[in-house]
Image (cartoon, helix red, strand yellow):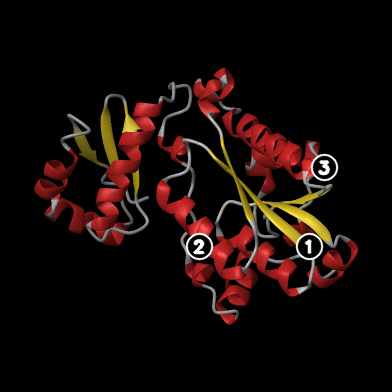
């Protein structure tokens, strides 16, 4: 099956939208094939502000309405406690919200952006969307991340080369409680490092310290700028450590 065929069959769809590469291509393809589509973005503490801004920007660029639902995801103990099933519960809750809003708006078919190169055996969230009967047309049509980036580049959309980004909750070790204050500090730390021209790094909570992980080509740069990094981040963390293993 091709996407054109999918949107011919499902010509009125709601998309669970993250602002990432995959769900952005779903918006673009649906628009291209003249489907009636609306995007639903559930804004929680787990998404940094730049991701939210990217989502609004790409939806506007494509010309698709985006419904934004603000939601306190940490109100749920099985999310806040951060156990091994956190991702499953989080994805389930988010898509239950999307489903509720979409159905009120008259959209009964709901889609999301898992693609054919995603390893679903390592994605507990995929189990949750399957249980809710959410469709994954990119995966069903055999489209890989490489295919999708090429299509977006050909379409001239800025999102085509955006780096993959895991939610802020992944910066906290499993079974360590996640708090609002913790997520705010992590987001600020990563924003500061981004403004210092670092790329594809992670700022993780390590006991009571912040552990910084960089790609191999930026570890030396980080070490040389360690004084500046500490000065910039000392407002949020007493101890800052550099992981000498590349991420």
Q: Nearer the viewer, residue 181 or 225?
A: 181
Whether 237 is drawn above or below 134: the answer is above
Kindly indicate the quadrant of the structure image that contains residue 123. top right
Check residue 57 in the rendering and tell me which mark sits there, or answer none: 2
Mark 1 and mark 2 in contact (Cβ < 8 Å)? no
Q: Toward which corner of the image does residue 216 lie, by quadrant? A: bottom left
Q: Quadrant of the N terminus?
A: bottom right
- Mark 3 or 2: in front is 2
Tag 3 secondary structure: loop
- C-alpha span from label 3 to label 2: 28 Å
Q: Which residue is mark 1?
A: 36
Q: Identify the residue at horizontal 50%, vertical 62% (top origin).
A: 57
Q: Earlier in the sequence, mark 1 or mark 3?
A: 1
Label 2 and label 1: CA atoms lie apart by: 20 Å
Sort mark 3 into few (<14), some (14-19) or many (20+) by Cα contacts within 10 Å: few
- Image quadrant assignment for residue 23: bottom right
Q: Position of residue 49 (x, y in %)?
A: 41, 48
**Identity of the residue furthest to the bottom in this view:** 154
The answer to whether residue 3 shows anywhere in this view is yes
Can the viewer see residue 213 in this picture? no
Along the polypeptide, which appears first: circle 3 or circle 2?
A: 2
Q: Position of residue 65 (x, y in %)?
A: 64, 58
Name the element at disc 2.
Answer: helix
Query: Mark 3 = which residue?
Result: 133
Front position in the image: 224 or 236: 236
Between tags 1 and 3, which lies in front?
Answer: 1
Q: Residue at x 79, y 66 (%)?
A: 35
Q: Secondary structure beneath disc 1?
A: strand
The residue sitting at the right extreme is 9
């Amino acid at each position: 099956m091709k996407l054109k065929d999918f949107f011919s069959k499902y010509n009125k769809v709601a998309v669970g939208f993250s602002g990432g590469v995959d769900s952005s291509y779903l918006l673009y393809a649906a628009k291209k094939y003249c489907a009636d589509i609306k995007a639903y973005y559930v804004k929680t503490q787990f998404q940094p502000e730049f991701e939210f801004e990217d989502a609004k920007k790409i939806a506007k660029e494509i010309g698709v309405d985006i419904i934004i639902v603000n939601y306190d995801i940490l109100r749920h103990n099985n999310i806040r406690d951060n156990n091994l099933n956190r991702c499953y519960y989080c994805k389930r809750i988010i898509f239950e919200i999307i489903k509720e809003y979409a159905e009120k708006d008259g959209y009964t078919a709901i889609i999301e952006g898992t693609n054919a190169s995603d390893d679903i055996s390592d994605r507990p969230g995929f189990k949750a969307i399957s249980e809710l009967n959410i469709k994954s047309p990119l995966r069903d049509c055999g489209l890989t991340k490489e295919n999708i980036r090429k299509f977006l580049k050909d379409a001239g959309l800025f999102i085509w080369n955006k780096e993959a980004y895991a939610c802020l909750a992944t910066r906290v070790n499993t079974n360590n409680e996640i708090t609002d204050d913790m997520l705010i500090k992590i987001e600020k730390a990563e924003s500061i490092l981004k403004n210092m021209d670092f790329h594809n790094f992670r700022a993780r909570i390590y006991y009571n310290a912040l552990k910084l992980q960089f790609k191999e080509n930026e570890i030396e740069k980080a070490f040389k700028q360690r004084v500046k990094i500490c000065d910039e981040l000392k407002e949020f963390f007493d101890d800052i450590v550099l992981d000498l293993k590349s991420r």
